[in-house]
Image (cartoon, rainbow, N blue to C red):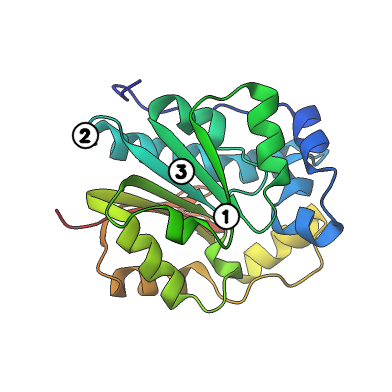
Amino acid sequence: AAVSAPLRFQPVARELIARVAAPLDREQRDESAVPSYLHPNPLVRWMITRRLEVAAELAGEALAAAGPEPEGLDFGCGVGLLAPTLAPHLARLHLTDLDTRPAAALVEALGLAGCRIWPAEAWAEALPDGSLALVVAADVLEHVEPLEPVVARLAAKLAPGGSLILSGPTESWVYGLARRIAGFSGHYHVRNVFHIERVVEAAGLRLVRRVALPFPGLPKLFRVSRYQRPA
């Protein structure tokens, strides 16, 4: 269905998140932020979910301007938490990650139509350049090395006028404190969101809108942005 109103994030039950994430090892679970979605502290759960709410809102803005039968890619989809929100508004939602078992299990459990799961080594060849109205890279590019060729590949997959939704951590001292409060001790990020934004802009994508989280006037933990490929 076309997007004619603000796109609202559709939450996934914590019990289902825990079930589909069960095959992952501890490092994989941490990289996918699974402990935060299941955290007993509601503030931690709110903050991690708020990123997805804003990403969904920006994706809705992009899809409202998309042509008929739009396709999208959730790059680094994790356990697939954006799939229930995005899939109903796309002719095809492609999902990829290093381990696609959780996302595949979630898609099956929720009976989501129009989803296609790709291994990490297959998506770039499978999806034609210029074919996507939407690419979402939510808190994944801080893990990717080398970054520049991956961003260039994602940008090439966008159709003219297509949008990239980017979310990433500031890696500020406040962010580090928040990670410790949430129970994370590992170092999984090789860069912050500011570096990623510079690489995205160097790839020729134009910033449309940016939201800093959690609130105006407070130290920022995340930035969520919508970039567009020039028409």
Q: Is residue 12 visible?
A: no
Q: Are marks 1 and 3 in contact (CB under 8 Å)?
A: no
Mark 1: which secondary structure?
loop
- Identify the residue under disc 1: 76
Location of residue 211 in the rendering, given as x and y in whole percent from the top left corner: 40, 50
Point out the tag, 2 or 3, that comes first from the N-terminus. 3
Identify the element where label 2 is drawn. loop
Q: Residue at x 41, y 68 (%)?
A: 151
Find residue 67 and name its label: 2
* Looking at the image, residue 209 lies above or below residue 169: above
Visible in this render: residue 73? yes
Q: Give the Cα distance between marks 1 and 3.
A: 14 Å
Front position in the image: 231 or 214: 231
| Residue in front for this viewpoint, 222 or 231 | 231
Q: In the rendered structure, which amino acid carries the disc numbered 2?
A: Gly
Q: Position of residue 94 (x, y in %)?
A: 48, 43
Q: For residue 102, what is the image quadrant?
A: top right
- Under mark 1, the amino acid is Gly
Local SS, label 3: helix
**Is 170 displayed left or right of 63 in the figure?**
right
In the image, what residue type sits under mark 3? Ala
Q: Using a 10 Å C-alpha cutoff, classify the residue at mark 3 as few (fewer than 14 neighbours), some (14 to 19) or many (20 or more).
A: many
Dot 2 crowding, Cα within 10 Å, few <14, some 14–19, many 20+: few
Tag shown at residue 55: 3
Decide: marks 2, 3 in contact (CB < 8 A)? no
Judged by depth in the image, the label closer to the viewer, 1 or 3, is 1
20 and 225: which is toward the camera: 20
* Residue at position x 54%, y 71% in the image: 192
